Amino acid sequence: MGKSLRSQISLYIMTIVLVVVALVSFLANAAVNRQFEAYMINQERGRREKIINDLENLYNAMTRSWDLDYIHAIGMYSLYDGYVLTVYDSDGKMIWDAASHDMALCKQIMGDITERMSQRNNNGFTTYSYDLLQGDRRVGTASIQSYGPYFLKENEFQFVNDLSEAFLVIGLLSCVVSILTGTILAHRIARPITKTAEIAQQISNGDYNIRLENETNTRELNMLLSSISHMADSLSRQEQHRKQLTADVAHELRTPLTALRSHLEAMAEGLWEPTAERLNGCVEEVKRLSSLVVDLDGLAKLEQDIFQLKKTESNLLEIVQNVSRNFEKEADNKQIRILVEGAPSSILLDKDRIVQVITNLLSNAIKYTPEGGQIKVQVKDEVTRGIVMIEDNGIGIPQKDLPYIFERFYRTDQSRNRKTGGAGIGLTIAKSIIEAHKGKITVDSNEGAGSKFTVLIPK
Ligand code: ADP
């Protein structure tokens, strides 16, 4: 037993969604980070340039001196922001230095930033040097030490962390949603297939009583379901057919066998004189049984290869004429006239099988027509089909029997009484052959007046 279809589909869907979610989260995160870094680096450069700009404004061109108090103020607030400033005058003499001003504070601020940023990179502090200008004139220099190429303040760092957390939450949520949708989708896809498998299983267990639920919305599945339903129908019909055939055969064999047995037993026990007449009666029964077996054999063969017709282009009129000729002697014996007329009709058909159909119909017509009767056989050629009509003026078929005479072993009461009938298979065989040709066979009859069988074979 493999894994269930449902769990496999769930697994596929979930894997696909998880891979997509992971990929999208990763790429989005990377893209946001890159943009953010570029923005921060730019921002950083701007902040440093602003400090230098502020410093340049503190030079008094008249007195050619620096306002040290203000430089101190700028140096301190820059330090709190994470920029360690050193300022030199035009002679290169240091006039303000954050480190020497408050070494401890410098160390603490630089330590805080390094610690915070070490979670992202290990770049360390970089020193940037600038000229302090008044117009074109260099009035001093300054150096700014800052964590490069950018660093995050406490609140910025918090923001970046929050963003990463949000990505994580979105990713996790997507996973949950993917598992849920995967399971639901898998259930929806797998259900009709599982149902179909169950139905097939049911059929293979011999239960053809299947009930199909509503159609699914998948065309291929609907096709599968309807094929299975047809298969079940046909299997069920075949089984029915087989049972019926067995019952019919048993029934047909029982009566002559019982009669034969009781006659023979009576003679063997000396109750009956085994006269020639009685023995002949037994021989007649045996003959009937033999012919029944021959008929059954024919029926079995026919049912076996009814779908393998060997079709050739044949003239229907010619076939009918030939078969009639074979019956000439039999008809003569009963002084029955067979009249064949009509037009040639060329049709693609299995000649041997159609000969069998006409033979069965003509033999019936002779059997069930009293001496001196007449049989008319007509062949018609139409654009799309050929027609054969065999009409006799014999005993006819009672109205109540008409719907059944094509059934296996069916015989009318008259034919049973007259002992002329065969096993009741001739018309069944004729009908099967004509239907295999996609044609039709019908009967029209009046009791006591005669019968007319019509055979239509499409071209
Ligand atoms: P059977 O071997 O008994 O003739 P068929 O299948 O050929 O079997 O025919 C079935 C029954 O239909 C016959 O037993 C007979 O009662 C009736 N039947 C067939 N053809 C004719 C006919 N031309 N005239 C009267 N009855 C007929």
Image (cartoon, rainbow, N blue to C red):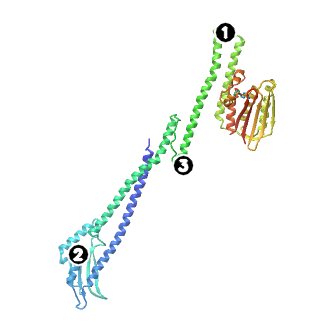
Q: Nearer the viewer, mark 2 or mark 1?
A: 1
| Callout 3 crowding tier (Cα within 10 Å): few <14, some 14–19, many ≥20 | few
Which residue is pictured at 28% across the width and 83% down the height? 131
- Whole-Å distance between the Cαs marked 3 and 2? 74 Å
User: Dividing the image into 4 quarters, which one contains the C terminus?
Assistant: top right
- Whole-Å distance between the Cαs marked 1 and 3? 74 Å
Name the image quarter holding residue 116. Answer: bottom left
| Callout 1 crowding tier (Cα within 10 Å): few <14, some 14–19, many ≥20 | few
Q: Is residue 183 above or below residue 137?
A: above
Which residue is pictured at 57% across the width and 40% down the height? 230
Label 3 near ligand 1 (CB < 8 Å)? no
Amino acid beneath label 2? Leu
Amino acid beneath label 3? Arg
Q: Report which residue position mark 1 lands on.
A: 272
Displayed-image quarter of ligand 1: top right
Can you give x and y, in whole percent of width and height, for residue 251 in the image?
62, 23
Element carrying mark 1: loop
Amino acid beneath label 1? Trp
> Does the rendering let one see residue 425?
no
Q: Nearer the viewer, residue 410 or 152?
A: 410
Can you give x and y, in whole percent of width and height, for residue 457 in the image?
72, 39
Which label sits on residue 79? 2
Q: Is residue 239 above or below residue 110?
A: above
Q: Report which residue position mark 3 lands on.
A: 219
**Proximity of marks 1 and 3: CB atoms separated by less than 8 Å:** no
Name the image quarter holding residue 119. Answer: bottom left
The answer to which of marks 3 and 2 sits earlier in the sequence is: 2
Can you give x and y, in whole percent of width and height, for residue 426 in the image?
70, 29
Q: Nearer the viewer, residue 214 or 336?
A: 214
As drawn, is 185 to the left or to the right of 92? right
Q: Nearer the viewer, mark 1 or mark 3?
A: 3
